Image (cartoon, rainbow, N blue to C red):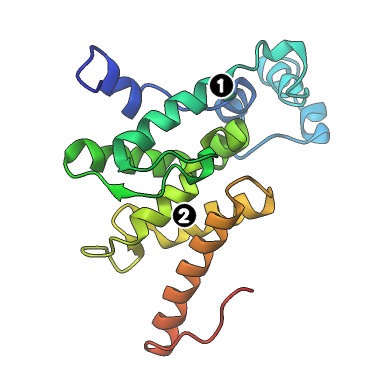
Amino acid sequence: MWGAPGMTELLLTGEDLLSDKIRHVRKWFPRGTPTDEYVEQLDEGEEKEAGKKALQDEEDDTWGGSGVNEYAYLYYNLLVASAVHSMLAPCSNHDGIGRLRPGAVSDVAQRRAMELWFDKGVRDSCGDSICPAASLACTIAQRAAGAAEDEIAIGLPKDLTVMAALGEMLDASMAFDYAQSMFETVASHASRDATGGEVFWRMG
């Protein structure tokens, strides 16, 4: 599959999985969706029109079709399948649990899958379409060898991992249980760092 013309570029750099609205907001307002008051005080022109559009609901016809979730499900699961050998599961939030595949293709697929998961805009755009992400993070976290001090495992920075896990938990996503497990993993690392090895709390 990765050898098909254009497939490697598509899976690694050719798709951001962002909705049209989030892509629009990032282009015009990198700090986030503007408030009504901010848009109101802008001078007439392109930026003001962009601000008005940014404030429109995602469901508004202005944003066109809403097929990003269906596409994201296929796209993301191709990355997960390239990264890990897993058993057939009744629900896709378990698809990241398994044995990491050896080789460079698996390595880059893991990194790309996690990069997308760390991006709040991607999570907001795709929702449960990328729910295997947290379980894949749990699988990657078991391979701690070679990780930097600020990582749980190679490709899993502690700060980005805990923010993604918290985001999943706050959204009550299908991946809640795996996200909570990752949060506890990061917390236990932080406890060991702070206490010299002793873990003194956990959730639940």
- Residue 7 spot, x, y in % from top left: 29, 18
- Residue 30 spot, x, y in % from top left: 57, 35
Question: Can residue 172 be seen in this snapshot?
Answer: yes
- Residue 201 spot, x, y in % from top left: 56, 82
Quarter in which the N terminus is drawn: top left
- Residue 128 spot, x, y in % from top left: 60, 37
Question: Can residue 118 be seen in this snapshot?
Answer: no
Q: Mark on residue 59?
A: none
For mark 2, give the secondary structure. Answer: helix
Q: Image check: 178 left or right of 189?
A: right
Furthest-left residue in view? 103
Q: Mark on residue 160?
A: 2
Task: Name the amino acid, label 1.
Answer: Glu
For mark 1, give the secondary structure. Answer: helix
Q: Residue at x 33, y 62 (%)?
A: 142
Which label sits in the foreground, 1 or 2?
1
The relative height of residue 88 versus residue 166 in the rendered view (above or below) is above
Judge the density around disc 1: few (<14), some (14-19), many (≥20) Cα neighbours within 10 Å.
Answer: few
The relative height of residue 43 versus residue 148 in the rendered view (above or below) is above
Q: Nearer the viewer, residue 40 or 71?
A: 71
The relative height of residue 111 versus residue 184 in the rendered view (above or below) is above
Q: Residue at x 65, y 12 (%)?
A: 65
Task: Name the amino acid, label 2.
Answer: Leu
Q: Image check: 98 left or right of 30?
A: left
Q: Which of disc 2 and disc 1 is earlier in sequence?
A: 1
Quarter of the rendering containing residue 122 = top right
Quarter in which the C terminus is drawn: bottom right
The relative height of residue 17 versus residue 101 in the rendered view (above or below) is above
Q: Residue at x 28, y 60 (%)?
A: 143
Q: Image check: 16 left or right of 36?
A: left
